[in-house]
Image: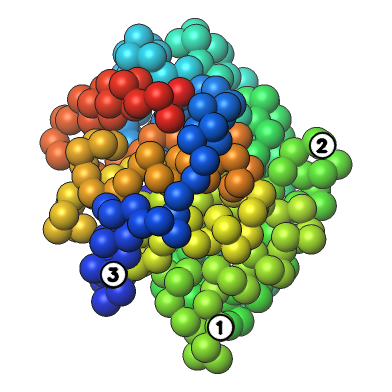
Amino acid sequence: MKSNILISALLPVFLLMACNKGPQDAVPSKETETMAKYKKGYQLYTIREELTNDSMLSASLISSSNMGYVQVESFGYQEGTFFGQSPKQFKKTIDSASLISPSGHYMPMQLATNNPEPIDTGTIEDILDAAEALNQKWVIIPWMSEGWRNIKGYEYLAQYLVKLSAACKERGMVAAWHNHEFEFKPLENGVIPFDYLVSTLKEEGVVFEMDIHWVAFAGEDPVHWIKKYPGMFPLWHVKDFAADTITQVPVGQGVLDWERIFSYAELSGMKHYYIEQDICGADRSLHCLKESIDWANSQKFME
């Protein structure tokens, strides 16, 4: 998803690592050869401009299914609806396109303010009802505004995720957090927020959706974090950027070394990956999806 934070000064260092696999990153070839098969999916945010009414929503989902996508990750649940459709209606729309939705992004609106405070847990059951209606297992909190990106804000977020996780467990579901780049900016006490969140929540049943792009954009190596916290990243966002780092491009057209990163999919615990592109240019979102999946289909390590 979008973020307005400037690029980290460490990014050039990471780009060298991402583009040039060294001996220390060597992985036995059999790890890729024996990797489980993954169903290709995408995050609906990529085509948000195509979801403004029922007919466009249906046509866009069918179009993406015809490209070869088999699953979508939802977003946009507000006031009881997805893009104006009830969860039950939206499930039918997804079904009619021969798609499934294993996971979704759900945004407690307090996180969009700049006033960190304990997050209201009163909407959790409504969120889980919506997710359950779509047969989703993974319930992901996707973002918080700049005013929350401090010690107190992360503490409140962690407290909320613990409660969300407990409610999810009762329904056989799993709570998760989706990163951007701001989680890698040290707090005033020197702590890296991403470290804080994973170490605090890993025993509470909370997992993490690693957005590979934003980790790299922060100047970090995704593989470093996978090695540090193996098994904690069952969901991935797969998106790419050009050499200027600001321009997002279809997957495979950028600078990230996807073969190297995917060779650690098993170690990460990855179950699903979703292609995403936040910015595709005017009226090009479906074209971007097509370019990404065409490239992914030609890569054995992404099967």
Between marks 3 and 1, how big is the CA–CA gap?
21 Å
Figure label count: 3
Q: Which amino acid does label 2 sit on?
A: Arg
Q: In this view, does 70 lie to the left or right of 137?
A: left
Instruction: Say whether disc 3 or disc 1 marks the residue closer to the N-terminus.
Output: 3
Q: Are marks 3 and 1 in contact (CB under 8 Å)?
A: no
Question: Residue 63: where, in percent of width, then height?
Answer: 32, 13
Answer with the quarter of the image where residue 152 lies: bottom right
Q: Are marks 3 and 2 in contact (CB under 8 Å)?
A: no
Pointers 2 and 1 in contact (CB under 8 A)?
A: no
Instruction: Choose the circle earlier in sequence order: 3 or 2.
Output: 3
Residue 216 at x, y = what percent? 35, 59
Callout 2: 10 Å neighbours few (<14), some, many (20+)? Answer: few
Residue placed most toward the observer, 146 or 114:
146
Q: Earlier in the sequence, mark 2 or mark 1?
A: 2
Q: Which residue is identified by label 2?
A: 171
- Above or below 176: residue 33: above
Q: Which mark is residue 224?
A: none
Residue 296: quarter of image:
top left
Density class for disc 3 (Cα within 10 Å; few <14, some 14-19, many ≥20) is few
Q: Which residue is drawn at 23% across and 49% down?
A: 255
- Please tell me which residue is depicted at 16% across the width and 30% down the height of the picture: 283
Task: Kindly identify which residue carries mark 1.
Answer: 191
Horizontal and vertical percent for residue 83? 44, 31
